[in-house]
Structure formats: structure tokens, C-alpha cells
Amino acid sequence: MSSVTVRIDPHVHSEDSYDGHEPVELILEHAADIGLDAVVITDHDTMGESKRAAEIAPEYGLIGIPGVEVSTADGHLLAIGVDRMPPRGESYATTVSWIHDSGGVAVVPHPFQRSRHGVRRRDIPVPGSNADDDDGSDEADDGDGVIGSDTVDEVDAIEVFNAWLFTGYRNRRARRFAAIHGYPGVAASDAHHLNYVGRAFTELTVRDRASVDDVTAADVLAAIREGTTSASGKRAPVPMAARHYLIAAGRKSGYYARTGARRGVATTVRGAVEAVTMARVGLSQGAHRFGRALSWFR
């Protein structure tokens, strides 16, 4: 049986988000440049640019997959593979059911991080209830354990690595939760700026396909459901980040030069300054870590 590995960043924001900054064309161009096979635009409670990105993704050699980060009554939830906006303000369980009825997959983003509208443990619909699954306190509220029933419509995956988290604690808790309940784990950049796109990504094994060119959006959704996922990524800049950020700065400069966007000059200058700053941070951290490693052999 043939299979192929696909790399996707399933959680990226465009300028259509209130806190996003980049046009989808630039995101897609950059995603292709750094070796991703797909990027899902998951803007906050809006799908216009995500659907457009999915339509034009093949022009960049990418798999087109629409999505959205919907605000539920219990926290944020990624709806991947849907072509219309889920209802906002509903419970997690109700929203998950809606996503499944619409043919998509429901992924829990940055779980338990209440300061970023992450869902509480108790609000994630899982079958059964086991207070022993509790592994510590959440911000503001840890809940009373996991609540559910054998008939709930479960989520499809947990975001076990989010590149926007500054420490590994929340990611570790997410990984443990996914392992306890047997959920597939995905990694995502949660990028709001171009230079973070692809900082974390998910590798999927897609069966019965000879090459990435043969893979469809439906194949990607099926692979998430089946759990053939592997999470990869880095939280903070490291030496390789210097190249990554500089590529992003150059990509933005080229894009705005071609499109002649009115805000191009200011954005390019700001992006270049940001790239150099982050590159310095990456090199500094890398030198520090290298020096610390050398000290072990003295």
C-alpha cells in the first residue's frame, strides 16, 4: 500500500482577522517557499479570506483547505474543512456536532490557556468522566475534571504544540490530555505574522496516494480523523530562525514590490526591522545554548 507524508500548518491568521497582518497571497507564497504542502487560514469568526485562500492554493502548489477559528461559549475551536461559518456562541459540544455535520474536523487550539480563550478541560466533549485525569490547575479555572457521556460528539484532534506559547507547560498538558483520551495531536504556528508561518507544523501520513500532488483536502481531513499525525515545531527563535525570518522579510519585500500595495513601504520596513531583531535573538539564544552545551564537557 502506497502512502505519502504531507506537511501542513493548520492554524494561521491573515489580515482578515482582527489581530492578523498578512494577505493570504503572501502567506501561501511563503508557505510554499518553506516546504509546506498546505496552510489553513483560520481567521477569527470570519471565512472570506480563508475560502479564497483555499481556492487559489493550487496556484502555489498547495492543497486548498478552508477553516476558521470560531468563538464558542466555552472557548475557541478550529473548524477545518468547512465551507461556511459555524454558529458563534454555542457550546463546544454543539459546535463540534455542527462541524461534523458540515464535513469538517474539530481541533482544540491552545487548550486550557484561558488568557487566549482556550477551552477548559471540563468543556471538551469526551466520553465518560474520570476525575483522576486531572493533572494540575488551569489559569482562572481548572474545572472539576472531564465531563461527558458515551453519546457525545467528540473533537477530532488536540493542538498539542502551539508555537505562540512561551513555555512548554501548556503544550505538555495538551499532549498529556490527548494521550489520556486517545486523540490525535497536531502542531500549528498560530501565526499572526508571516515570519511565524510554519514555525510549527503537522506531518500527516496519507494512505493510497503516490505523491503529494495526488492528495486532496478530503484526504487531509481523513488523515487527521485517523490520527496519522506527528507534531513538529519550535516555540522560540533558535539559530535556524535567522534564515527563516530573513526569508520572510525578503518575501514580504518582493510581494509588496510586485503588488504596489499602498502600505507596502511601511510594512516592508517594519518587517525588515522585525526580521533583523528576531534573527539577532535567535543567534543570541543559539550561542548561549551552544556555550552551555560546551560547558558540559569541560
Image (cartoon, helix red, strand yellow):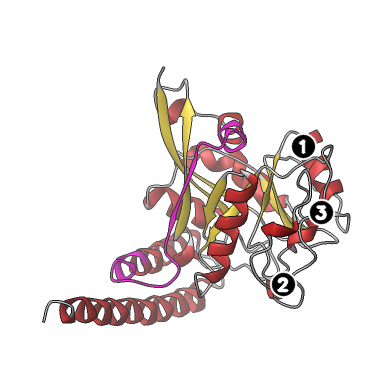
Judge whether 137 appears above or below 171 on screen: below
Residue type at numbered disc 3 = Ile
Residue type at numbered disc 1 = His
Judge whether 28 appears above or below 275 on screen: above
Question: Left or right: 257 with respect to 289?
Answer: right
Quadrant in which the C terminus is drawn: bottom left
Point out the residue furthest to the left here. Answer: 298
Residue 100, numbered circle:
1
Please state the extent of the stretch shown in magenta in the rendering.
222-244
Residue 276 in the image: x percent, y percent?
A: 35, 79
Q: What is the C-alpha distance between the residues marked 1 and 3?
A: 20 Å
Residue at 80 percent of width and 65 percent of height: 144
Residue at 57 percent of width and 39 percent of height: 64
Query: Label 3 belongs to which residue?
Result: 147
Residue 114, numbered circle:
2
Circle 3: element type:
loop
Mark 1 / mark 2, whichever is N-terminal: 1
Residue at 50 percent of width and 29 percent of height: 215
Mark 1 / mark 3, whichever is N-terminal: 1
In the rendered image, which quarter is residue 213 located in? top left
**Which is nearer the eye, 163 or 50?**
163
Comparing labels 1 and 3, the label whose residue is closer to the camera = 3
Residue 83 in the image: x percent, y percent?
A: 74, 40
